[in-house]
Amino acid sequence: MARQARRLIGDLSRRLLYPKQLQQHRNFGSPPPPPAVFVDKNTRVICQGITGKNGTFHTEQAIEYGTKMVGGVTPGKGGTEHLGLPVFNSVAEAKAETKASASVIYVPPPFAAKAIMESMEAELDLVVCITEGIPQHDMVRVKVALNKQSKTRLIGPNCPGIIKPGECKIGIMPGYIHKPGRIGIVSRSGTLTYEAVFQTTAVGLGQSTCVGIGGDPFNGTNFVDCIEKFLVDPQTEGIILIGEIGGTAEEDAAALIKESGTEKPIVAFIAGLTAPPGRRMGHAGAIVSGGKGTAQDKIKTLREAGVTVVESPAKIGTAMLDVFKQRGLV
Amino acid sequence: MVRGLLGKLASRSLSVAGKWQQQQLRRLNIHEYQGAELMSKHGINVPKGVAVGSVEEVRKAMQEVFPNQSEVVVKSQILAGGRGLGTFKSGLKGGVHIVKADQVEDIAGKMLGQILVTKQTGPQGKVVSKLELELPVYGHRIMKSFLLASFILQITVYLAEKFSLVNEMYFAITLDRKSAGPLIIACKKGGTSIEDLAEQHPELIVKVPIDVFTGITDEDAAKVVDGLSPKVADRNASIEQVKKLYELFCKCDCTMLEINPFAETSDNQLVAADAKLNFDDNAAFRQKEIFALRDPTQEDPREVAAAKADLNYIGLDGEIGCMVNGAGLAMATMDIIKLHGGTPANFLDVGGNASENQVVEAFKILTSDEKVKAILVNIFGGIMKCDVIASGIVNAAKQVQLKVPVVVRLEGTNVDQGKRILKESGMTLITAEDLDDAAEKAVKAIAS
C-alpha cells in the first residue's frame, strides 16, 4: 500500500517537475498485481529463436491464442520484423524496447543454456525454455547461476511450457483442449499433461494454470514452487500433480503438502509404475536407480500426505471430480 | 535386474552416485579398455593393458607388451557385468581368467568369438569380440572385484600390468541434483566390501561438492585425497590425479565416473584399476570422438535400428507394441496396459517433431518384433500432428505386412484430419476413444 502511494506521489511530482518525461513514462498509477501463478493476461512475452522453425510456428499459435507476444530475439536479425513483431539482437534490447517481462526459448540445444543466461542477465521475470536435449553440464551451470539470484524464474528446460487458459499461453500445448477453471496442474510430462487437461475439461472443472516443469534432472522450477503458488491462489481450488519415476521432486512436494495442512483437494498420478528399474524412460530425469525414485515410493509418500493417487492415467479427471463432490465443492 | 556395486551403495547411504548408474543400453557406455585409454589420454594412471581381437593379436601383445611376465589376466569385455561368474555357451566357465603367460593364447582362443552368459546378459548372452589382456594386479582378489565391476563391459580381453597392490579405495564423480553440481565421493576402503562398509561406516564416505564456475581447487582435491587416505601414494601426485579426473569428467560431459578400486602401487602411485564412465547423451553433438566408441554389436538390434531413425525406443519383453508421443504418456501407456492385464513389448516415444518417415520406421521396428501380438498407437498431438501420424501409419502398412491387430487412439492437434486419413485408407484398424478404451481393446485383440 505504502509503496503504491509512494509511486503515485513520485509520478505526480515527476509530472510537475519534468513534464517532458511524461511521454516516456508509461507507468501512470499503480502497476497491475503480479500474476498468481507466474503468468496472466498482462504478461508480455518475447521469443528467443523466433525466426527458427519452431519459434515461428509456436509464436503464431501463441498470437492466435491471445498471448501478448511483443517481440523476438535472433542475433543478427535485429531491426527486422517477423510475424508482425520486432526482432532484436539481444534480450536486453528487446526488453528495453518492448517492456517484456517474460521470454520463451526455442533455441537448439547447443545454444539454449546461453539463451537462458542472457535472459537472466537481462533480469526478466520469467524464462520458459522449451528446448529438449541441453547437455547436463550446461544446465548445472545455469542452475548455479539461477540459485544466486532471485529476479528471474526459469521454467524448464525440456518442458511444454505454461498456460493460463483464456489469458496466456507460453509453449507448445494445444490451446483448444484447455478451459478456464478451477484446477491447477503441475507436471513433469508434456503429453501426459494434455491427458489431465482433457479429462478435467471433460468433467467440467477446467484449469486455472497449467505448468509443465519438464523432464530434465536440472531444471528451474519444481513441484514445490508451483504448489506454493497454487495453495494461495483463490482461483485454484484443486491441484493435480503428474510425476514420474526418478529423483525426489514428488517426495518434496508431499512434504510441502503435508506441512501446509491445506484442504484443497489434490490428485496425483505417477507414471512409470510398471517401468523396469535401471532403464531410463525417455526423460533424462526419469530413471530409477539403487532403489531410489521408484513410483511405489512416491505413491506411498504422497498418499501419506493426504493426496489422492490414481493408478490409472485415464482416471485423473474423474478422481478430482469425486473428491470435489465429497467435499461439497460441486 | 542390474544390482551393480554402485547401485547397492546408493541404496544404503548415498542417494547420489547411484542415481545414474543404471543406464539403458542405448545410453553411451564404453568398454573397459576404451575408458582406460581415455583416462590415460587425460594423464590419469591406469593399469597397463592391451585390447586384442584375434589370436594373432594376442600373440603379438604377449611378445611386444608383456614379454617378461609370468602371469596375465584375460578379461572378457562385454556390455554387461558379472563376467567373472559367467559361463560361455561353449561350456568354458568364467569370463575372466588369470593364466600363465604360455597359456594365454590358448585360453584367448577359447573366449574370442564365443558367447558369454552372465547374470546380467540374459540367457542369450553376449558375444566376445575383443579381449583385454592385463597383468594380475591383486592376485586372486581380481576375480572378486570383477564380479562387482561395471556391468557394461564388452568381452574384449584386457591384459594389464602386474604391480603390487597396497591398498584399494573408492572414488566417484557424479552430477548431484541436491547440490546442483558435480560431487566427488571418496572412501578409503574400496574393492569388494564397499557396500558393507557404506552400511556399517557411512562416516568413512567423504563427499566434496565442486563449484562449477570455480572448478576444482587444490583445497577440494586435498579433501578428496584425505578421504581416500592413501597409505603410500605421494600426496601431491594424488591431488593432481584427482584434479585430472575432475577435468576429464567435465571435458567429456560425463554424467558419472566411478573408480573402484582406486589402487596404490608399490611404487607410490595412485592407479585407476577399474573404471566406469557414463556419458551424457545430450552432449553427443560435442563429443563426437567419444560417441564414435559406441559398439552397436552389443546392443539390442531393435534399439540400434530405433537410434538410427532417431526414435526413443527401449525393448522389453511383452506382447503389445506401443507407439506414443511423449515420454510421460509412453510410460503411462505401459502402466495402463499392465493394469488391463497386458504386457508392453517396448517403450517408444516418437517425440514432438516426428516426421512421417520416422513413424514408418517406428512401425517397421514394432512389426518386426516377433513377440508383438498387437500394436497400440496412442497419440495426443501437441506439436505432433495427428494427420502426420495417420499418414505414417497408412504408409507403413503399405510397406510392411501387418500381421497383428492395430489399435489407434488419436487426440489433439488435427485429430479430425488424422481420423479421416485412417478411415479413408481402408485399413483394418481398431479405433479407441480414450486411454482406458485403447488399453482394453489392445489386450482383447491379443486374446482373439
Image (spheres, coloured by chain):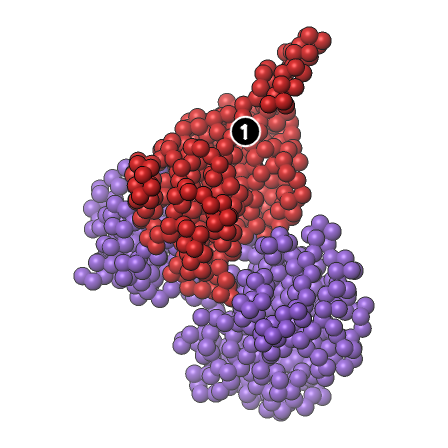
Q: Is residue B103 left or right of residue B2?
A: right
Quarter containing the N terminus of chain B: bottom left
Q: Nearer the viewer, residue A74 or A231?
A: A231
Q: Is residue B73 left or right of residue A212?
A: right
Image spot of residue B391 (x, y percent): 31, 44
Q: Quadrant of residue A148?
A: top right
* Residue on which the image places disc 1: A34
Q: Residues within 10 Å of mark 1 (few under 14, many from 20)?
A: few
The residue sitting at 66% across, 69% down in the picture is B203
Q: Which chain is purple?
A: B
Image spot of residue B106 (x, y percent): 55, 89
Residue furthest to the left in view is B448
Q: Nearer the viewer, residue B232 or A112?
A: B232
Image spot of residue B315 (x, y percent): 39, 63
The answer, for residue B350, to whether it is visible in the render is no
User: Looking at the picture, does residue A227 appear above or below residue B48?
Assistant: above
Quarter containing the C terminus of chain B: bottom left
**Disc 1, SS:** loop
The residue sitting at 45% across, 60% down in the picture is A297
Q: Quadrant of residue B331?
A: bottom left
Image spot of residue A8 (x, y percent): 63, 16
Q: Amino acid at mark 1?
A: Pro
Disc 1 is attached to a residue of which chain? Answer: A
Q: Which chain is red?
A: A
